[in-house]
Amino acid sequence: MGLALGESGTRSLAMFDFRPAPDCPKPEAYRQLRDAAEALTADEPDGVANMANIAALLWDFLPDLNWAGFYRMVEGELVLGPFMGRPACIRIPLGKGVCGVCAQDAATQLVEDVHSFPGHIACDSVTNSELVVPVVRDGAVIAVIDLDSPLKARFDAEDQAGIEALAAMLAQRI
């Protein structure tokens, strides 16, 4: 959001609508997502505010999600950050579930069927597939971006590449 002067000369918040066209090819949609994220976070030093806006942006941009958000690395475990969706697990130990494995290994986890993932943590029984991408700063995982879908095999290599590019851009902003 930005500040703008209204007709009466008072300050008001400007609203942004960054949604891509419904027929937009996936690589272009992810480019637009990165551009929107860049615009929203460029001048904001607060990492939590930036994560909150990015979670909302992911929710608006990506179809067929039931959860989109962040887990932050806090004292050696993942702690729930800003998100869109149903209430979620608050703390996740490293190496546990899809998010914990992603954070421990500093490696993206693209899971077509979470029910076949060893140690999957079912925060929402509706979830069938998941994409979790580490946000790495100075060689350390500082957060993960977690996307859940009720559809099996919802995520593919294009989604992975798009969210990895977003995570790289956000590493200095959250």
Image (cartoon, rainbow, N blue to C red):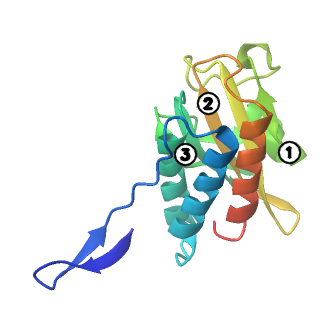
Q: Which residue has dot 1 on it?
A: 104
Name the front one of labels 1 and 2. 2
Q: In the image, what residue type sits under mark 3?
A: Leu
Q: Nearer the viewer, residue 150 or 61?
A: 61
40 vs 120, left or right, is left
Q: Nearer the viewer, residue 74 or 33?
A: 33
Q: Which residue has dot 2 on it?
A: 148
Quarter of the image for the C terminus: give it. bottom right
Q: Residues within 10 Å of mark 2 (few under 14, many from 20)?
A: many
Question: Where does the image place residue 15, in percent across and percent down from the top left?
Answer: 33, 62
* Residue 21 tag number: none
Q: Residues within 10 Å of mark 3 (few under 14, many from 20)?
A: many
Question: Where does the image place residue 164, in percent across and percent down from the top left?
Answer: 76, 50
Q: Nearer the viewer, residue 138 or 40?
A: 40
Secondary structure type for disc 1 = helix
5 vs 149, left or right, is left
Question: Where does the image place residue 66, in percent across and percent down from the top left?
Answer: 52, 29
Q: In the image, what residue type sits under mark 1?
A: Gln
Secondary structure type for disc 3 = helix
99 vs 124, left or right, is right
Quarter of the image for residue 42 reads: bottom right
Secondary structure type for disc 2 = strand
